[in-house]
Structures are given as structure tokens and as C-alpha cells.
Image (cartoon, coloured by chain):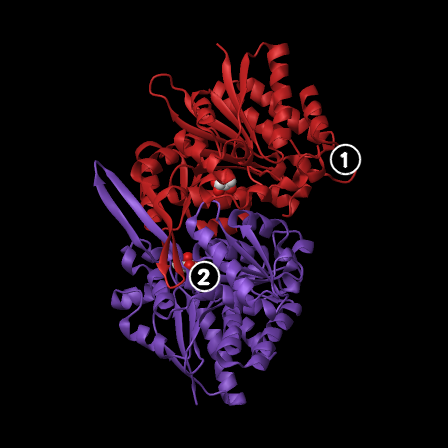
Chain colours: A red, B purple
Amino acid sequence: MAKNLFLLPGDGIGPEAMGEVRKIIAHMNDAMGADFALDEGLVGGSAYDAHGAAISEEDMAKAMAADAVLFGAVGGPKWDHVPYEVRPEAGLLRLRKDMELFANLRPAICYPALASASSLKPELVEGLDILIVRELTGGVYFGEPKEIIDLGNGQKRGIDTQVYDTYEIERIAGVAFELARTRKNAVCSMEKRNVMKSGVLWNQVVTETHKRSYSDVKLEHMLADAGGMQLVRAPKQFDVIVTDNLFGDMLSDVAAMLTGSLGMLPSASLGAPDAKTGKRKALYEPVHGSAPDIAGKGIANPIAMIASFAMCLRYSFNMVKEADNLEKAIANVLDQGIRTSDIMAEGARQVGTTEMGDAILKE
Amino acid sequence: MAKNLFLLPGDGIGPEAMGEVRKIIAHMNDAMGADFALDEGLVGGSAYDAHGAAISEEDMAKAMAADAVLFGAVGGPKWDHVPYEVRPEAGLLRLRKDMELFANLRPAICYPALASASSLKPELVEGLDILIVRELTGGVYFGEPKEIIDLGNGQKRGIDTQVYDTYEIERIAGVAFELARTRKNAVCSMEKRNVMKSGVLWNQVVTETHKRSYSDVKLEHMLADAGGMQLVRAPKQFDVIVTDNLFGDMLSDVAAMLTGSLGMLPSASLGAPDAKTGKRKALYEPVHGSAPDIAGKGIANPIAMIASFAMCLRYSFNMVKEADNLEKAIANVLDQGIRTSDIMAEGARQVGTTEMGDAILKE
Ligand SMILES: CC(C)[C@H](C(=O)O)[C@@H](O)C(=O)O
Ligand SMILES: CC(C)[C@H](C(=O)O)[C@@H](O)C(=O)O
């Protein structure tokens, strides 16, 4: 049966990076009989330009029906002043919410060849391998009320609501504990229970979930601000970090930057397994943004997008060997000193987007 | 007229660090005729042990009446399980709220002698001098509803509310722009306008305040997650950062850790100038916490507490020369290679809390 992939390249460097994934998929279909069926849609600013919405209903329906969605990046100065409801990010947020992709997996790994590119001292990041498990469909991103009220007298009031229910915390904690068992078996949960009631509940539910079903996994709790500090001070102390939507946004960006490998980092956003088929809805996207300043120049680094496809092979199609091979190809190419401009180093060979894709394909 | 200081040493290493400030104050009174009048109270866990509250009404009244409050640190494992309403942090949050200390100034500076203690490469932090201006009486810290609801069926719901009104954003932006004029004249405002309505309002009001009264200052906007990344990547690009209560909590901790000087960093929390007297309510506290693991051992670094007192001299009493001298004394002692254990380096001389205080006093 064909594996249905829905591609949403988006804006900025998204389409260029996605082009390299297309090449890899074509190769897997032609030379390896992989049977991927591709369809493609618009999201973000490019969808706004075409349809006046950050994603059309038709493309939403295709995303819902696909086996997996590959997502590029959205946004750019061109759309800085479009109405809030149709801003580029709204497309991504709707995909996450409607597909119920509650589990966002963000590995922060340091490619050995790139340790020196980190702003941290190399010994602090060499061999770094953290997995941040971020809750993605709750919290302040989606809670209501979320509005700006006019109070009169020239005063307005901006309101956002952070909401977490027990079941939401339980299921994301479960994902973190399960994944920890396949790694170093340690989870650190981060919240601000000293100032937030949702943090108090988060802490309780993670603790109970641990006691009930995962007491073999090492569990630690840390305040999110202290967690940010510890990430900078000694990132290797962490294995799996589980945290809410907003803290996850901040902390995973800090962690990504630490690695020196920002342009290389993928992410997976997963739903719950279907009761009948066991299949999870899933979306894969690079951690980096749309980088409008370098878009269209053929110099963007496609590695994060390619690594996101590797995660797709692993999590959506259980093609573990193929995923391993693709990840190894990326590491090999970096070891050979082949670099796009963002990760250029002395003595390395600088290449553009397509050459990088070709080099990985060759491997 | 006597200058009334109210000391709240708090828990953990708070009392030890405060002891060193007492010595400096005594010296200023005796040898320099400074006329400080001291009173002292309890806050945090120690107040809970004595009164069953994180701060007593009597001590709150004294804090409200004082010219300035010096605050040590609160919290420790001993009080991890006291009820939410009387947890140690509640004392600090009540002081901030009742004294209306809306402007939290957190300098992140890298003492030259300590650049190598940073986890960042020295060239990225040498000479670093950022001022984070954090809104301190609004946002998700205080917005209502803030509660845990029992939904039945074993489900609970944790709710926190992020609220900002125009005037709150205006006044903190004003503080940031004013301070920028005394520095490198550049402000970077951080929020998440792409997902939060309060972020949209924040962005608008900062932009308008700038246009109306501070167009001579350079203003930039950054998404808070990107801001966290940029702090790690290239912190020296920033002069003044202005942000909300929760982002300020996270970002100032990351910035503090970057400097390698965490045990050295002070903060000031200021209210609005009184309409008649022009005086601001103020509280000064170290950025570091109560460090219960090393409390009572005489090894805590008192520099952040002493530097907080220097900020007090500057902002509450306009004793600019004295503040400069005290800050210079700290830098000199570090240059001489005198170090507490937290900042120990090869070839330096390791001292305890009181010797560090004495060394600074001598300078
Ligand atoms: C684009 C934006 C809405 C998004 C977020 O805040 O979640 C991004 O920062 C991310 O981390 O995926
Ligand atoms: C102790 C805690 C309530 C406090 C905060 O979250 O504001 C602390 O982290 C700080 O930054 O001053």
C-alpha cells in the first residue's frame, strides 16, 4: 500500500529545503521500491497570498488524511502586518490543533563535526544528546479567553489563558517516560509550580504518572527558569526533558542553539495512536524558521528538513534501518567537511543547498 | 534624616550574605557618617516557621514604610510541601505586588576576571553588559483566574491567566527607554506576538511609547524564543531588553548564567515615583536563590548581595559615588584573585563568606 506523504513547504527557505527531501524520496521510490505517494499544498504566507488564509480547507483535509505531513517553515516580513487570524503561524497552529499533535519531540544533538560551532565551550556540548518532549496542543497557545479588550480611556487589556487538564499532562508524560526507556532512562520535568497553578497540577500529575506506570525511569523536577540556566551551564546532565507548550518553545530553542547545530535539528509532532489501526497522525518539521533573508539564494542548509524526514521514516513508517542510514549519511557528509554557509568552518568545503542534498543522497 | 533600610535576609544563604552587607553599612555609618537606620524581619520559610505565613503583616507594614528593602533569598526543601498560599515564594510575590514594584532591573554583566568561568566561549562574554528590564507586578504571575478546578472523573484543570493593560506596558517601556539613554541607547522588546494576544498588545504599546516619547532610542522587537536563542548565540548584541514577567524570569536567568558571574549578580525592583516626594519604593535582591545545599557553611558568595546594596545606594539614595566605589571594590577584589568556592579558578585564593566581605570592605 502506498505511503501517503503530504508536503507543506511553506515560505522562505522551506521550498528549497523540501526540494532536497523530494530528491531523496524519488530515489527511495525508484531504486528501493519504497512506494511513497506525494501530494503538496500551501501553508503560511504563501497560502495567504493564494487563498487569504494561512491554510486552505482543502489542504487541511489532505493533511488530516495523509499518513504523515512534512512541513517546511512559515513567515517573513512580507506578512508581518496581515490580520492576526490569518498570520502565517496560524496555519501551523491549526495543523497542530486539528490533527491533535500533542507530542512535540525535539532532539537537541550536537553533531561531533560541529561541536566547535557552538557558542558553548566544546567540552560542554560534545556528544550532547537531549530529547525535549514539548506538549503542543494545550497551555497558553490555545486556552480561552485569548483576546484584546478595549477598556475605553485609551486603555486596552491583552489576555491569554494557560490551561492544562490532567489527561493532557498524563499523556505527554507517558510519551516522555516511554522514550526515556529507549534512551538513558531519565526524565526531567520542568514547570513553574512556585508561581503557576497549572505548574502545580503539572508537577502532581507527572509525579503520579511516574509512580503508577514508570517508576523504573529516573524522574527529576526542575523549575523552568532554573532549567534554562542548567541547559546553559551543563546541558549534558539531561536525557529527556518534558515540559509545557510555552516553556517547551523557549527551552527547546535555547537547547537547539547550544548544540551549534541549529540548521540541522529536526522535530516530530505526534498524535495519539488510533484505537483501531494504532497509527498516529504526524507532522515533521525543522526547528529552524523560514530565514527570509537567505531565501531563494540556493544557500540554505537542507539538513534539518532531511533529518525531519528521517524522523518520519522512524516514527510514521517504522523504517528504522532507512532512518538510521539517512542519519548516518548526514553525519558522514559533515565528517567529510562538506558544509553549507551557516555551518562553514576553516578548511571545510562550502556548498549550496542542492549540492548538500546530493552529497547526502550519494552517501 | 536617617535612611531607613529594612532587611529581609530570608532563608538558606540569605542571612550569611546579608551579614556582609551589615558590616559595610556599619562601616559607612561609623567612618563616613552615612546615617542608615536598620530594622530586620522574616520572610519565606523562616517567616512560615515563626508565624505560619511567608511574611507577617507587621513585616509587610515595615517594608511598605522603609526607604528601601534589602532582600536575601527564600525557599528550601524543608518547605517544599507547605500549602501553596504560604510557600516561601509567596512572601516575595506579596512584597512585589503590595509595594507595586513593577520594574525589575537585572544587569547581566561579565566581570572581566570571571569571563573564563562562563560556559560560553570567553570572546562571546568578555565585556558583556546587558540590562534586562522585567515587568514584575503583572502577567501570568498575578492574573485571575489562577486556580485548580476539580472536574470530577479524576480530572483536574489548572488555570493561570496572563493579563496586561496598556498602562502597565507603557510604564515598563518608559523605564527601559530612560535607562537605555544612560547606556548604549538601544532597547530590544521581547514577546510572543505570534501566539499571544498580550504579546500583540505589548508590541503595539512599546512601539507607540517609543514613537511618542523616545524616538531617539533605537528600538528592536524580537520573539521571546528567538531572543533566548540570540542570548546564547551572541549576547553582546543587546543593550537593554524589556520583557514581561514570565519571559523576564526565564530570559534573565539564562542571561545571568551566561556571564559566568551568577553568584555576583544583583537586582533592583522599583515602584513608580511618588507624586509628591518623587521617591520610589524599592527592593534589592541577588539574582541567585537560597542555595540550601551550602547554607550555614560559611562558603556562600556574598557579592550579589553586596552588589544589590550598591544598586540600593544608586537608585534609592542617589549615592552615586559610594555605589561606584563599592562596585569598584568588588571588581578589585576579583582582580586580586580572591574567590569564594563557586567562582574558584586555578591560581586564585579561596576564601569564605566573611573573608570575601572583609576584602571588599578593605577596598
Ligand atoms: C512559529 C511559532 C508559532 C512556533 C511556536 O511558537 O510554537 C515556533 O516558534 C515553534 O517553536 O515551532
Ligand atoms: C522565587 C520566584 C518566585 C521568582 C520568580 O519566579 O519571579 C524568582 O525565580 C525570580 O526570578 O525572582
Q: Indicate the position of residue B345 as horizontal and vertical percent values.
A: 63, 59
Q: Indicate the position of residue A322 as horizontal and vertical percent values.
A: 57, 18
Q: Is residue B64 left or right of residue B299?
A: left
B3 up-or-down from A112: above or below: below
Q: Amino acid at mark 1?
A: Ala
Helix, strand or loop at label 2? It is: helix
Q: Chain ID for label 1?
A: A
Give whichever of A155, B307 is nearer the camera: A155
Q: Is residue B348 left or right of residue B14?
A: right
Q: Indicate the position of residue B287 as horizontal and vertical percent values.
A: 49, 62
Q: Quadrant of the C terminus of chain A?
A: top right
Q: Is residue B268 left or right of residue B220?
A: left
Q: Is residue B354 visible?
A: no
Task: Look at mark 2 in the image and give the residue it sits on.
Answer: B169
Q: Amino acid at mark 2?
A: Ile
Residue occupying the far right of the picture: A347
A263 up-or-down from A191: above or below: above
Task: Look at mark 1 in the image and give the residue it sits on.
Answer: A348
Label drawn at residue B182? none
Helix, strand or loop at label 1? It is: loop
Q: Is residue B120 visible?
A: yes
Q: Chain ID for label 2?
A: B
Front label number (1 vs 2): 2
Q: Indicate the position of residue A301 as horizontal and vertical percent values.
A: 66, 33
Disc 1 to disc 2, how far (Cα)? 48 Å
